[in-house]
Amino acid sequence: MTFDEAVYSYLLTVPKGSVVTYGMIALAIGHPRAARQVGSALHRNPRPGEIPCHRVVNREGRLAPAFAFGGQQVQADLLLSEGVPSFERDGLLYVDLDQFLWRP
């Protein structure tokens, strides 16, 4: 399995209404220092709409300002449709990790 395939496979296990961080995915697939590479893999998502890359946020809960599939507002809307609200701080959008972080 390639790195990208491992990222997508893991992400398919994240339930609706939850988020994970880039670092959590990297650790879970055996590459603990590869959070940036996880982000790159998500930008190459071959099946948007099936592989829920919108459920990935940074370690602070921040949504991606340049979400690959339409910007942070699109990511926020997709998360909200799953019951995960976002809030604005300093012009950026965040989710509450205490409430919505998936802990498998």
Image (tube, rainbow, N blue to C red):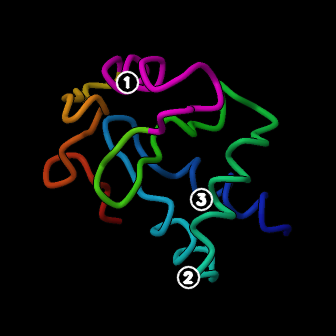
- Residue bearing the label numbered 2: 32
Question: Do tag 1 and tag 2 residues touch (Cβ < 8 Å)?
Answer: no
- Residue bearing the label numbered 3: 10
- Residue bearing the label numbered 1: 76
The span from disc 3 to disc 2 (Cα, nearest Å) is: 14 Å
Residue at disc 3, secondary structure: helix
Query: Residue at 71% across / 42% down in the picture?
Result: 43
Look at the image and give the residue range highlighted in magenta. Answer: 64-81
Query: Residue at 46% across / 49% down in the picture?
Result: 14
For the residue pair 14 and 94, the one nearer the viewer reads as 94
Q: Quadrant of residue 50?
A: top right
Q: Quadrant of residue 82?
A: top left
Amino acid type, callout 3: Tyr
Residue lying at the far right in this picture: please name it. Answer: 2
Residue at disc 2, secondary structure: loop
Q: Does the magenta segment cover residue 56?
A: no
Query: Residue at 40% across / 38% down in the picture?
Result: 63
**Label drawn at residue 26:** none
Number of the front mark, 3 or 1: 1
Q: Earlier in the sequence, mark 3 or mark 2?
A: 3
Is residue 33 left or right of 17 when viewed as pictured? right
